[in-house]
Image (spheres, rainbow, N blue to C red):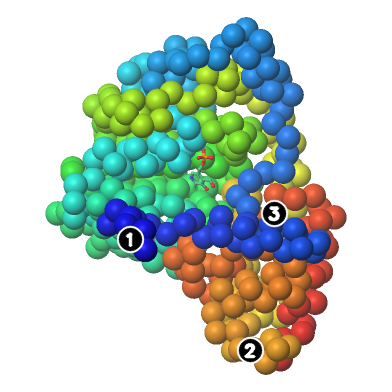
């Protein structure tokens, strides 16, 4: 066998990518598969942003840039944090990277010592625990329940913190549940963190602009006394439908940003110069299209919720943000598939729906919460309606 590094034993391929592979294989075999598994909006990147990317290529803006981003992009990032979040950063306190994902990874790699713990509320974005493990840390998974809206409570946070705790990762609006922390809920968590000065806070704000009910709030704005240990991470992947451009950014204390820059300088270097130019246009440009996107997404969300409510064995609450419906499928467990096989867990349910309904979605265990499914409603309403009809039919075939 191949002699891989020991650290490879601490990382699994992303389970969402695994679903996409299966979906592609079925599609290649000629099946009309509908993929509700991908965390990606179907909207085109707005034209003015694409135009800025094309203009960058034509202007010869195709060379290395400063590792942490061009001066123009840093200015646009600083202006965004100021405008949307009321946060003031200097140029040495912001950094751009190849997606928010790279910034999360570099921040952990730069700060986590072997055995350090990182508090990860579950359900969580699939990459957090594996990134912590790759950085030689211990993910400290804290299960959050439906009764708390899938959100971390101050008491659960207090109980999870030990002398080894290095980070709390907070993701609001959250993937996979769509949960949005209110300003008061964030303030209550910050009150706990004020008592634990070694703990850093990673605010993953990537779904900031996709909030349907309630308001978006971010820890650095809620509790300025913590600002010197909060890293606020964001990007244009979800807000401007730019997943493929790979452009994320972060703002935080200069010492941390400098360390992230050092790692980046010895690994990926600057994010694409073309994507940086496009991101300047995204951040500086008109944001009014977002209201239309939110309206479209809200209608899709309601379509999915209505359909789920009519399927025996499935249940879902109204998610406040992001573009996911978090479905409790525990009512289906124990049922038999037409083949006679029993549905023992959420992975079996996802497999049944993929094989019988040709609908791809991700099982809750991938997010640290068994008994659930995540439906991404990032497709046209007709397609979503067709997918939900197929799911209903496949569930009706269970015995
Ligand atoms: N953070 C969360 C919670 C996400 O769901 C995702 C993408 O799915 C990311 C970060 C990664 O975003 P990017 O495309 O900017 O790397």
Residue located beneath label 1 in the image: 9
Q: Residue at x 61, y 42 (%)?
A: 210
Q: Residue furthest top?
A: 59
Task: Name the residue: 19% across, 55% down.
Answer: 115
First in sequence: mark 3 vs mark 2: 2
Q: Residue at x 63, y 89 (%)?
A: 341
Answer whether labels 3 and 1 touch (C-beta < 8 Å). Answer: no
**Closer to us: 291 or 166:** 166
| Vertical relation: 80 (above or below) 391 | above
Sequence-first tag of 1 and 2: 1
Q: Residue furthest front?
A: 1
395 or 219: which is nearer to us?
A: 395
Q: Which residue is mark 2?
A: 341
Q: Is residue 277 left or right of residue 94?
A: right
What is the x, y in percent for residue 35?
70, 58
Query: Is there a contact, CB below 8 Å, between mark 3 and mark 2?
Result: no
Element under disc 2: loop
Inspect this view and state whether residue 137 appears: yes
Left or right for 118, reference 162: right
Q: Which residue in the protein does label 3 denote?
A: 377
Cα distance between the residues tagged 3 and 1: 33 Å
Q: Callout 1 environment at 10 Å: few (<14), some (14 to 19), or many (20+)? A: few
Q: Nearer the viewer, mark 3 or mark 2?
A: 2
Q: In the rendered structure, which disc, 3 or 1, sits on the residue that comes first in sequence?
A: 1
| Image quarter in which the N terminus is found | bottom left
* Residue most extreme to the left: 163
Query: Is residue 33 positioned above or below 203 on the image?
Result: below
Whether disc 2's CB lies below 8 Å from ligand 1 is answered: no
Q: Nearer the viewer, mark 3 or mark 1?
A: 1
Regarding mark 3 in the picture, which secondary structure is present there? loop
Cα separation, mark 1 vs mark 2, equals 31 Å
């Amino acid at each position: 066998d191949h002699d891989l590094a020991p650290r490879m034993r601490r990382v699994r391929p992303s389970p969402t990518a695994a679903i996409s592979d299966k979906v592609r294989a079925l599609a290649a075999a000629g099946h009309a598969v509908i993929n509700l598994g991908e965390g990606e909006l179907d909207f085109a990147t707005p034209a003015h942003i694409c135009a800025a990317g094309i203009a960058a290529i034509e202007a010869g803006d195709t060379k290395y840039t400063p590792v942490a981003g061009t001066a123009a992009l840093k200015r646009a990032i600083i202006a965004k944090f100021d405008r949307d979040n009321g946060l003031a950063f200097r140029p040495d306190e912001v950094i751009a990277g190849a997606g928010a994902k790279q910034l999360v990874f570099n921040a952990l790699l730069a700060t986590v010592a072997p055995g350090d713990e990182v508090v990860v509320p579950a359900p969580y974005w699939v990459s957090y625990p594996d990134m912590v493990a790759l950085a030689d840390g211990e993910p400290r998974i804290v299960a959050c329940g439906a009764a708390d809206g899938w959100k971390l409570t101050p008491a659960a946070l207090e109980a999870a913190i030990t002398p080894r705790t290095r980070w709390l990762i907070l993701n609001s609006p959250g993937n996979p549940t769509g949960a949005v922390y209110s300003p008061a809920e964030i303030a209550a968590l910050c009150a706990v963190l004020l008592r634990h000065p070694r703990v850093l806070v990673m605010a993953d704000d990537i779904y900031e602009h996709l909030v349907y009910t309630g308001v978006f709030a971010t820890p650095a704005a809620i509790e300025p006394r913590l600002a010197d240990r909060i890293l606020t991470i964001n990007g244009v992947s979800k807000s401007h439908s730019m997943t493929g451009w790979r452009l994320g950014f972060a703002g935080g204390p200069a010492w941390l940003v400098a360390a992230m820059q050092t790692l980046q300088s010895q690994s990926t270097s600057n994010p694409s110069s073309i994507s940086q130019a496009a991101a300047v246009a995204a951040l500086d440009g008109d944001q009014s299209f977002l209201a239309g996107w939110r309206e479209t997404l809200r209608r899709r969300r309601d379509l999915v919720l209505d359909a789920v409510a009519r399927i025996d064995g499935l249940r879902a609450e109204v998610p406040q943000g992001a573009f996911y419906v978090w479905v409790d499928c525990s009512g289906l467990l124990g049922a038999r598939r037409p083949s006679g096989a029993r549905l023992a867990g959420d992975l079996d349910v996802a497999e049944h729906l993929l094989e019988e309904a040709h609908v791809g979605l991700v099982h809750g265990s991938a997010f640290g919460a068994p008994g659930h499914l995540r439906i991404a409603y990032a497709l046209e309403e007709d397609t979503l309606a067709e997918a939900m009809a197929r799911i209903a039919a496949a569930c009706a075939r269970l015995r």
